[in-house]
Image (cartoon, helix red, strand yellow):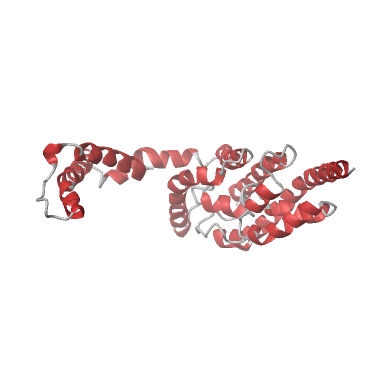
Amino acid sequence: MKSLIIALLSAELFSRLSGSPKLMIKMPDTVPPAVAKSFAALLPAIITIGAFALVRTIISTSFNMPDIITAFYNTIQQPFMGLTNTWVAGLILAFVPVFLWTFGIHGANIIDPFLQTINLPAIAENAAALEAGHAAPYIINKPFLDAFVNMGGSGTTIALIIAIFIVGRRNKQYTTVGGIATGPGLFNINEPLMFGLPIILNPVLFIPFIITPMVSVTIAYWATKLSFVPAATIATPWVTPPVINGFLTTQSWTGAVLSIVIILVATLIYIPFVAMSSRVEVEEHKAESK
């Protein structure tokens, strides 16, 4: 977040200074255009860098802080991280991506910058606390969500694939899409399901698609809160397969067991809706063929 703010302000300042003819170093016409443009931007670049260096120095000396990054972290980011470490915050972080997905908006990409800037620093603090023999201060972070909520992709859709093969076998479309989606789903990629079934704008499947991750984050949060499972301390790649991710993220076999339990619960949630949706699809195809 701090990087984005600085980038926006510095770009705006540089662009305004670059438009001033008084700050342009004009080169002879014989100089190549690329070289001439680099000299024309020299003074605006020096002024922009100097201005932000001056601001950094003032903040460091006036507020007795080592640098502007530490100042931002202590005053804004760290308190905000604490606000996102509650069960309610976990429900919100689980709800927003899937809600956006139901309208065709890539919810995971929308919320990912927030998770990267706010939650990933919690991993380092969790690891430091555990090494010092203290309880991990942050339960909810991006690896936690990847390991226990986004299994198979947004909506815990690894469970949807399992449900399709249990109760959706009468529907050829569902079994075909489920077979295609199995490989990507093992690496938490669920676009074949989103657009193939589809889930997007599906009046039946969007219900478990929204409910399931909220149930998943609830189980995982309280299992961690009650010390049944260690807090997430390892930032594994988001494409790490389910169950394996739970083990690696928590560095404990209990993390793998928790992943399995959540998948089973999520499958039970999906089954009645998959059966209903599959039955409706079959009946519609029969009606169209008459």
Q: Position of residue 31 (x, y in %)?
A: 13, 55
What count of labels does the image hold? 0
Quadrant in the picture for the N terminus: top left
Q: Is residue 112 left or right of residue 68?
A: right
Q: Is residue 180 left or right of residue 278?
A: left
Q: Position of residue 205 (x, y in %)?
A: 73, 42
Name the residue rendered at 62%, 48% in the picture.
Answer: 154
Q: Position of residue 119 (x, y in %)?
A: 47, 47
Name the residue rendered at 58%, 61% in the picture.
Answer: 240
Q: Is residue 103 among what the camera can see?
A: yes
Name the residue rendered at 87%, 45% in the picture.
Answer: 289
Q: Is residue 61 left or right of residue 179?
A: left
Residue nearer the viewer, 217 or 277 = 277
Residue nearer the viewer, 55 or 19 = 19
Q: Residue furthest left?
A: 28
Identify whether 64 is placed above or below 153: above
Name the residue rendered at 79%, 56% in the picture.
Answer: 165
Q: Is residue 73 among what the camera can see?
A: no
Quadrant in the picture for the C terminus: top right
Residue nearer the viewer, 58 or 2 = 2
Q: Position of residue 197 (x, y in %)?
A: 72, 48
Q: Is residue 205 left or right of residue 239?
A: right
Q: Residue furthest right?
A: 290
Residue nearer the viewer, 232 or 192 = 192
